[in-house]
Image (cartoon, rainbow, N blue to C red):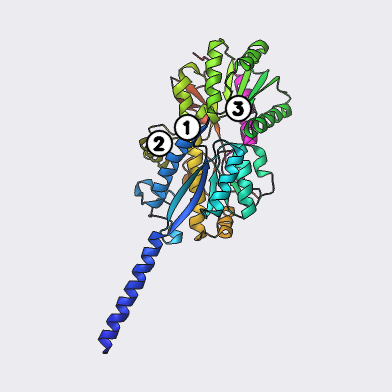
Amino acid sequence: MNLKHVTGLLCAAAMSLALTAGAQAQDKVVKIGVIMPMSGGTASIGAHAKAALDVATDIINNAHPELGNFPLAKSAGLAGLGGAKVEVIIADNQGNPATGQNQALRLITEEKVAAVFGSYQSGVTLTSSAIAEKYGVPFLNSESVAANLTERGFKWFFRTTPIATDFAKIYTEFLADMKAAGAKTDAIALVHDNTEYGTSVANTIAGAFKEKGQPIALDVAYPVNATDLQGQVLQLKDKKPDVVIMISYTSDAILFAKTMQSLDYKPAVLLADDAGYSDPSFTKAVGKISQGVFNRSSWVVGPPGSPSAIIADMYKKKSGEEMDDTVARQMQGFFVLADAIDRAGSTEPAKIQAALKATDLKPEQLMIGYKGVKFDDKGQNVLASGAIIQLQDGENYVSVWPKANAEKAPVLPYKGW
């Protein structure tokens, strides 16, 4: 065998190895388990989340030069793992904490996911993240705001969204500004369901106002997925609070709006804690009879051609809906998780955990209006932030506070229908 022949064989072998390695990198898949309510009273949220994650995985798995320097958009796949693709495995939590817990166990032990993402309802996030903690698997939450989720001493739980304490502070400052402008905001009523989300957020808001010397005048609790809310609305109508703060999921928010109209009840200020009031299903069903409702949000579309505006357009083409705050927070959280896996260069849980701890994203690297993403020792994003929006002109929310970032001025009193 002459030297030329040997050299040829070696070159062929080298090319074969390179092609095999390339194919393996291309074929490699990173599984991320997603726990969302795909059925039940908040199924519309699950459907919107799926559409959002479809868009997010498209951006991650394929090159999108139109997004400029947006993280993970320049190359196809996760560069840190040789171009590996992200695969989303969605599990239905049915809006039930026990079901969410079982689904987390299945995703970790049977599907062998690298990380878990979810679970919308704070009560479901509470149980499903406990399973991830037990098995030492990173769990990223993007939208559950119950303050106690990051008070459990967990090491594998990370949350990107602002939380109840952040929004409670926003509510006190916003209502103080409205009072300075002439609105009556002295008597405040809290209306909330009996889930982990409803009760914990209500307690957090009540504590924030009490610290300001303004105790809550009325606390109205009700069973989640209620079929009749006349008693609760009549209670509000009888006590006549100046401000009603609503902490409700979609089906309840819709029923409250219809019941308020049927009983002809309108508070001077109606302020919602996101959740059902941000769901496009709410604005489609009862937007025209809920004119003037205030809501919280961290989502800003941004100028035409910006990454956020391009992503919003991609989502609308995928889902047929405008991007809302909940969807935007979910998509942003998923990008943060994928970015950490990419920087880890591995699917090993400990390496992903370390990368999440080291996260330090700047505002220009985000598609949402946070001041950045940086986790404290409890796993909470200390740079999360939000603002107040208002439903004006049919089904459209516009930013109204703080004034420096407002699209329009707030309109008072609550118009309704």
Disc sitting over residue 151 in the figure: none
Q: Amino acid at mark 1?
A: Ser
Residue 31 magenta-highlighted = no
Residue 173 magenta-highlighted = yes
- Where is 8 relative to 212, above or below? below
Query: Residue at label 1?
Result: 44
- Where is 179 relative to 262, above or below? below
Residue located at (67% from left, 40% from top): 148
Q: Amino acid at mark 3?
A: Val
Q: Amino acid at mark 2?
A: Pro
Residue located at (33% from left, 72% from top): 16
Name the quarter where the N terminus is drawn.
bottom left
- Residue 308 image point, x, y percent: 42, 40
- Residue 8 image point, x, y percent: 27, 81
Task: Bin the neighbour count of mark 2 within 10 Å (Cα to Cα): few under 14, some 14-19, many 20 and up.
Answer: few
The stretch of residues the image draws in magenta is 160-182
Tell me whether the residue at label 1 lies in contact with that at label 2, contact meaning CB atoms closer than 8 angstroms.
no
Residue located at (50% from left, 29% from top): 278
- Residue 91 image point, x, y percent: 51, 44
